[in-house]
Image (tube, rainbow, N blue to C red):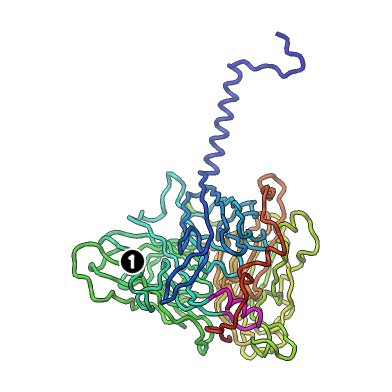
Amino acid sequence: MENKGKLPVMSRAAELPLLICLFLCQFLLYKTRGDVHYYDFVLKENNFTRLCETKSILTVNDSFPGPVIRVHKGDTVYVNVHNQGYYGVTIHWHGVKQPGNPWSDGPEFITQCPIEAGKNFTYEVIFSDEEGTLWWHAHSDWTRFTVHGAIVILPPKGKTYPFPKPDHEQVIVLASWYKWDLRQMVWQAIQTGEDTPRSDAYTINGQPGDLCPCSSGTTYRLTVDHGRTYLLRIINAALNGDLFLAIAEHNMTIVATDASYTKPFVASYLVISPGQTIDVLVTANQNPGHYYMEVRQYSSDHLDVVYFDHANATAIIQYSGNYTPPSSPVLPTSLPFYKDSPAALSFNKKLRSLASEEHPIDVPLNVTEEMFYVVSMGMIYCPNSTCKGRYGNKLVSSINNVSFINPTTDILTAYYWNLSGVFEADFPDDPAVAYNYTGDDLPLSLAYPGQATKVKVLNYGDTLQIVFQGTNIMDTAENHPMHLHGHSFYVIGTGLGNFDAVNDTQNFNFVDPPRMNTVNVPQDGWAAIRFAAKNPGVWFMHCHYDRHLTWGMNMAFVVKDGNTTSTRMKRPPNYMPPCNIATNNTNWLKERTPHANQRNMGKI
């Protein structure tokens, strides 16, 4: 039959190779992208009792900490977030690079506006080269206080760990607890310019433990079998505290940090900053009994600063079997004291990438962009000393003398649609003035940054070296855990004092530097990182102390598209939460009228 005006009809024999080709293409695409998983997160208020007090907190799926997301390397997850709370919220997938997909990264007013109360939004979480432990958390105001949970990324199917396979695994989430209304206390601090509240206790998997009031009956317990080895996936979800952790009479073998494998080393304690994760192996090789896992804050500021959370959280490692339980668990003797900076520095210096054939490194040896970022505390002038911060002013923080302020439209939308007036593309590569950053009695003229919404624009493929330099302005030197969204980086060096561009660079580690997404800039010191900007989009960088983030120790990178489809940013999804100014003003801090409760408020 004649087939005018139509394509020729294929014979069945001719169709077969095409069908085989299509099947193979789909199979390879599936293998490349991994499995697809679906989760529902329901955000709503629940009553929880801790430290003898019952209070309402925002939770995901009625739990604190929230649910664990489990995937294999290279999988994709769709998380439908139903906001049944009272105020706008966003969720961030901490450490997940989200290649080409900043639309689902989550920081409010950076890549999206908040999910309004009564609405929902589905995040597409794309895993790529991450393998190990990460976490998710709210990224709007201080809501991550109780809205957080673990992400477990297993090796690809058919692969295993680069260390002996453990007998069991357990997630350990370290977090903060505030007895009073944190929302009102933070709102008051922001309005008056005074310091933000400190926590009343830390928790291990949601519980403060035996050493805290009204807590002994609910202490988290991990039952272990003698001779078995356990992989503990430890996450610091605390708002503002670096934490020491030790287990009585048990050593830990450190095997990964921030979802990247490390050269194993044995330690009797560890230190972990907010935002970081550390994976450790623990073998139950002691006499059957009860042993405390204990956590205390590492307070990195000056020795005379005593305004911090002194409560020690505990969990119990409890051996199975028939034996007479002790009257009290054994306490660790290796846990460093609150101000033990040498212990913290010593631990961090031991972190090295595995750098094996199966898990190679790719630290850039040549850089196209060099930045020197000074991270500092400061003040905003208040006329007639009407505020309650230092010298009657408002407390702020900054990078290179720029204190970041949130726009009312998210930066990603403004960049993608070329909207003007939302941000400035001139974030400085260097501070305006060089000085003795870590010196004593620095002039107060250095303490007044400008306030702006500034970004640094990068070309796809740029290779960066950033040196973070801490300062002692207003005698406020302390650690700064700096977190970068959308990328991992290599920590090629750290040190105390002012960075020396001639001598310190001679000791940079290009052989096996640790690969991280959150680096701890030590008190009165510096840290140097390198990475390649190969992820197009808008990516936030900030201190992971929430009080410093609130005060402005933030900026963002805009990474331009590359020249190929695979190096370009994805188009936005069909629905993004709207930037409704009237609705977005109903956020976590503004949901209720603040009161004058000043408990636990102080000055730095």
In the figure, is residue 5 to the left or right of 348? right
- Identify the residue at horizontal 65%, vertical 67% (top origin): 586
Which stretch appears magenta? 181-196
**Does residue 339 appear in the picture of this structure?**
yes
- Identify the residue at horizontal 71%, vertical 50% (top origin): 562
Q: Residue furthest top?
A: 1
| The image quarter in which residue 475 lies | bottom right
**Does residue 507 appear in the picture of this structure?**
no
Rendering coords of residue 50 (x, y %): 42, 73
Q: Secondary structure at mark 1?
A: strand
Rendering coords of residue 438 (x, y %): 61, 84
Quarter of the image with the C terminus is bottom right
Residue 430 in magenta? no
In the figure, is residue 527 to the left or right of 178? right
Residue 193 in magenta? yes
- Identify the residue at horizontal 60%, vertical 20% (top origin): 15
The crowding category of the residue bearing disc 1, from other C-alpha atoms within 10 Å (few below 14, some 14 to 19, many at least 20), is some
- Identify the residue at horizontal 72%, vertical 79% (top origin): 449
Please name the amino acid that badge 1 sits on: Arg
Position of residue 212 relative to residue 22, above or below, is below
Rendering coords of residue 225 (x, y %): 27, 60
Front-most of 174 and 565? 174
Position of residue 78 relative to residue 241, above or below, is above
Please identify the dominant SS of the magenta region: helix
Rendering coords of residue 285 (x, y %): 27, 65
How many numbered marks does the figure carry? Answer: 1
Front-most of 153 and 535? 153
Position of residue 308 relative to residue 550, above or below, is below
Which residue bears the numbered disc 1? Answer: 221
Position of residue 527 relative to residue 395, above or below, is above
In the figure, is residue 509 to the left or right of 293? right
